[in-house]
Amino acid sequence: MEDDEKKKYIVLGIGIVIMIVVIIILLLIKPKNVATIRIECTPEKISNVKKWTFDIGKNKIVSSKIEIMEDYMNYDYELVDTVTDEVKNEIKSLILQDLGLEKEKEDGIKVSFEFDNNINVTIEVDYSKADKHKLDYMGLNIDDNVDIDNFIDEVEKYGNETFTCKKSLIK
């Protein structure tokens, strides 16, 4: 019986070792948090920026969306009851030129316009696809490694302490 008891303890010991190894492996290969955090910043004071939104995943900015409101006077036009397509196209062209873009949709960058009492411009950036040189020109190229708390402080400083930012979990 001694041999049978030794075999039981050996099998039990091997089972425990295998279980510990499996637990250690599972802990090491545990998937990291893939949640995406959204940071929405709005100005506290009058500004041409209405809202600036950032989606951050794995400490990298995935995308951003900036909503800007421009005055027709900035482009030497006065608001009239109806803005002609010709005027809209000229203003779009001037704004795209200011941004260093040739068209409204380029790889990873989309610019959309809405004309009412103001010119509402929305710039959406997909950082995985957008040309870094164009982002530099636009002032939208942001470092790859993002510390969420410091990032909020940086955005608020970028806006001369005029932004209030809130963060939320989106995925």
Image (cartoon, rainbow, N blue to C red):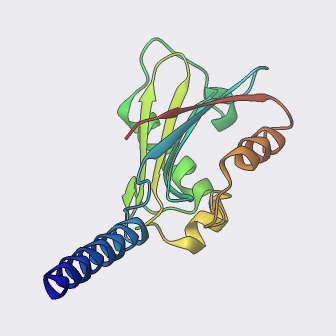
Which quadrant of the figure contains the N terminus?
A: bottom left
Residue, far top: 81
x and y percentages locating residue 83 in the rendered image: 44, 23
Q: Position of residue 93 (x, y in %)?
A: 49, 50
Tell me: residue 106, above or below residue 4: above
Counting from the top left corner in percent of width and height, residue 29 is at: 37, 71
In front: 46, or 82?
Answer: 46
Residue 24 left/right relative to 69: left
Farthest front residue?
A: 1
Q: Quadrant of residue 72?
A: top right
Of residues 127 and 38, the one nearer the viewer is 38
Q: Name the residue rendered at 35%, 67% in the picture.
A: 23
| Residue at screen point 76% across, 49% down | 150
- In-image side of 148 versus 108 (left or right): right
Task: Point out the image quarter for the C terminus.
Answer: top left
Q: What residue sits 42% from the left and 71% below the top?
A: 28
Compared across the picture, whether 168 is left or right of 128 comes to right
Quarter of image, res 77: top right
Mark count: 0
Q: Is residue 14 above or below residue 48?
A: below
At x 51%, y 36%, the residue is 121
Relative side of 80 to 151, left or right: left
Relative to 48, is 153 above or below? below
Residue 151 % position (x, y): 71, 48
